[in-house]
Amino acid sequence: MDAMSSEDLSRAQLELFHHSLGFVKSMALKCAVDLGIPNAIHLHGGCATLSEIIAGTGVCASRKLHVHRLMNLLTVSGVFAASSAATGATANAPGNGGEAVAYQLTPMSRLVVDSNKLGSMAPLIRFLVNPLTVPTFFDMHAWLKADEQAGGAGASSTTFFKMAHGCSVYEMTRKNADHNALYNSAMVAASPTTMEIILREAAGCDIFGGVSSLVDVGGGHGAVSVAIAAAFPHVKCSVLDLPRVVSQACADGVTAVEFIAGDMFVFIPKADAVLLKWVLHCWGDDNCVKVLRKCKEAIPAGGGGAGGKVIIIDAVMGAGPAFASNKETQVLYDVHMMHIDGVERDERGWEKIILEAGFRAYKLVSLVGIHSVIEVYP
Ligand code: SAH
């Protein structure tokens, strides 16, 4: 190996620390959400000192210096902003215990405030960083080495989650009521922000033009369909999901849309359009092709402008804005999906399953960050 310059050596070492400590960022964000720090800042008029945050969250006053260090990290990573409490000038949370600093919300932390008009995305953070899933990543290397043919520890596990827990994520949601509630609340919490972006885009892209009925397959508790029905009252929306999900949604009192209990691999009710949001990325190609074939049977043939289409909302790897965090989030998401045997697809990956399922054409209608819209025509 060539000798590195001191500058390169120290940069490389720093990057290694940066990567290895990346999990602290996730944990600090979850900690702030669990403590209710974004709510406390919001309730304090959008700007709060450390003492005000401590008073607003019930954190023990003796931990003040530790909260200051937490806020320092969250400010450097952009979750909060900091300015001098006296002058208002941008500050980087100096080491005086934080009292001279006023912390503010950034666009990111505004999304986890309870009174946010789109609802708080806090349940999504709690789900992505949950104690049943995160530790299973410790077994990723062992799972990758486990030879499926030869047998041995982990060999028959489709995912490292299953290797760790002896069951898939779906089985876990069936047998662990807390995990099920965490999962469902995360799906509900994530949808309004996504739908706000997509419905704004939809106006320009005419996604729902000519669609008078829509079935939201794997629609969970119906948050997406409720948003579509509100924005496009002429579209009759129904949600197809597994019986236990539908009965929970009905028990929760969601009435704006019709719920149908069923299995998308067996039957999808007829409609002008079938919506699949965050469903196909949970499955490998063979299963996706099976679901897409069922979707094709459910919509009018011919398609095009007057309905007869499948609308997929999922990530398209490599698409969207060029900034670094977009690209990194996409690949993080992809590896994250390995724990449920899911996959994020690039355009070629989407094209492959769409054509294999017998569709004629598709169009990437909107590529907004982590959620893109693909229209698929029979
Ligand atoms: N579309 C929702 C939920 C996505 S999570 C949203 O964007 O918020 C995937 C959903 O697929 C879950 O609600 C899960 O219960 C559902 N699902 C999984 N297998 C299914 C099947 N065989 N038939 C119907 N729905 C299924």
Image: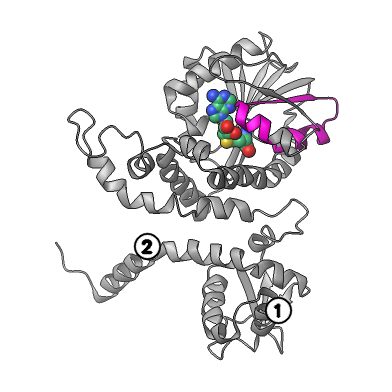
- Vertically, is 164 above or below 217? below
Single out the mark in the foreground, 2 or 1. Answer: 1
Of 259 and 23, the residue lying toward us: 259
4 sits left or right of 117 in the view: left
Q: Quadrant of residue 312?
A: top right
Element on which disc 2 rests: helix
Q: Quadrant of the C terminus?
A: top right
- Vertically, is 262 above or below 339? above
Q: Earlier in the sequence, mark 2 or mark 1?
A: 2
Of 261 and 17, the residue lying toward us: 261
Q: Quadrant of residue 6?
A: bottom left
Q: Residue shown at 82%/36% (left/top)?
A: 230
- Residue 352 image offset from top left, x and y in percent: 45, 22
- Crowd tier of the residue under label 1, counting other residues whose Cα lies within 10 Å: few below 14, some 14–19, many 20 or above: many
Q: Amino acid at mark 1?
A: Ala
Of 313 and 282, the residue lying toward us: 282
Q: Is residue 254 magenta?
A: no
Q: Which residues are magenta?
A: 223-248
Q: Amino acid at mark 2?
A: His
The residue singled out by tag 2 in the image is: 19
- Residue 241 image offset from top left, x and y in percent: 62, 27
**Can the viewer see residue 344?**
no
Q: Quadrant of residue 97?
A: bottom right
- Residue 270 image offset from top left, x and y in percent: 69, 13
- Residue 189 image offset from top left, x and y in percent: 66, 47
Q: Is residue 237 magenta?
A: yes
Q: Residue shown at 51%/81% (left/top)?
A: 66
The residue singled out by tag 1 in the image is: 48
